[in-house]
Image: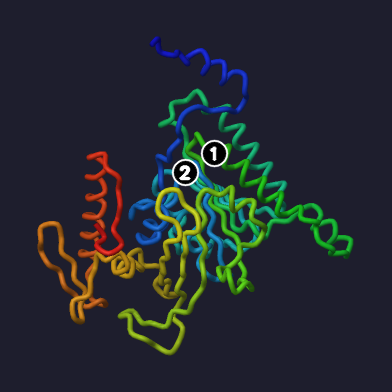
Amino acid sequence: MRPFDLSKFRRDLTKSIPGISLGFHDPKHWIDAGNYALNYGISGNFKRGIPLGKVTMFAGQSGSGKSYICAGNLVRNAQQQGIFVVLIDTENALDENWLKPLGVDTSEDKLLKVNMAMIDDVARLMSDFMKDYKSRFDNVAEEDRPKILFVLDSLGMLLTPTDVNQFEAGELKGDMGRKPRALAALVRNCVNMFGEYDVGMVVTNHSYQSQDMFDPDDKISGGQGFIYASSIVVAMQKRKLKEDDDGKKVTDVRGIRAACKIMKTRYNKPFENVEIKIPWDSGMDPYSGLIDLFEKKGVLVKDSTKLKYIDKTGKEHKYFKNSIPRSLLDLIMDEWDETKLNRLQEDTPIEIDDQTGE
């Protein structure tokens, strides 16, 4: 049978429908979220956090660590990879004196800080930027195009013109559902605009406690439309950290325990739970939550009062839970990723057994 030649169809298709793109656009660049366990929950890889080309949302209660991860860790790590960051502050809360101690470079050649309050203004900024980006770089080799990360903190604080007009008139009657529709349209358009480029977006949003006994998960404010449109959704809860540096219980609160549930992802099994400790005096430990993850997966198993790991050479490693060295955690991550890589090369499906971790 004579093969079907699609070359003319492809040319005609791209010419006749503006904005269409052909082929796959899998993420090529990932930004470390600052914690190995959280990276794994999102992407299935300990060294990869959130991807460019997608829209990622971190939603949670006030003080749950959203801004710390998004405006701190992700911005710092993006800059270290040569990615330019546009930081959109809708809460007037991201001060330079807060960002610098987190390692963020606030110089103009690394970061553009924009203060905005209106959804329409953010949409115009994104649209104008992408039009200019495409006109300047569509004919430039992909590896030579600049990489951009937008960070919007927070989505929930954005206003509609109705909100402003009613406030000025002194009559706050609600906006008849305009805000959820506008937020959904903003996220949907960004997802479509970013797809084939090394441009990504991270947003934070607020959540509130569910009143439904049959669906106890926290609810994300602003409607469901933009949740469906987002590529990755991480729900966060704030809990008190009452432990010292050695993991011993104390009576006073030393920080927060950020409980993260990966509500939506295409790169790993969804609904993975990760708990990250963020002490106020020392900040997030990138290894925080790893031991619990390895226990859950059956990679670290109980042996009397200790936890045991048998490496690929058959060597046995046994430690008390609070004394497991980082070198062993690095070894487990390396062997875990190596096992997955070997299975990929053999062209066999990757399945991690919940009991053995293999």
Q: Are marks 1 and 2 in contact (CB under 8 Å)?
A: yes
- The residue wearing badge 2 is 52
Q: Residue at x 50, y 23 (%)?
A: 139
Note whether 356 is above or below 122 in the view shown: below
Q: Quadrant of residue 24?
A: top left
Which mark sits nearer the N-terminus, 1 or 2?
2
For the residue marked with disc 1, what is the amino acid?
Answer: Phe
- Mark 1–mark 2 Cα distance, whole angstroms, equals 8 Å
Q: Residue at x 33, y 66 (%)?
A: 293
Residue 108 visible to the viewer? no
On screen, residue 241 versus residue 319, left or right, reads right
The circle on residue 194 is: 1
SS state under label 2: loop
For the residue marked with disc 2, what is the amino acid?
Answer: Leu
Viewport quadrant of the C terminus: bottom left
In the image, 322 versus 279, the foreground residue is 322
Place of residue 288 in the rendered image (x, y in percent of width and height, measured from the top left): 35, 68
Note whether 117 is above or below 21 in the view shown: below
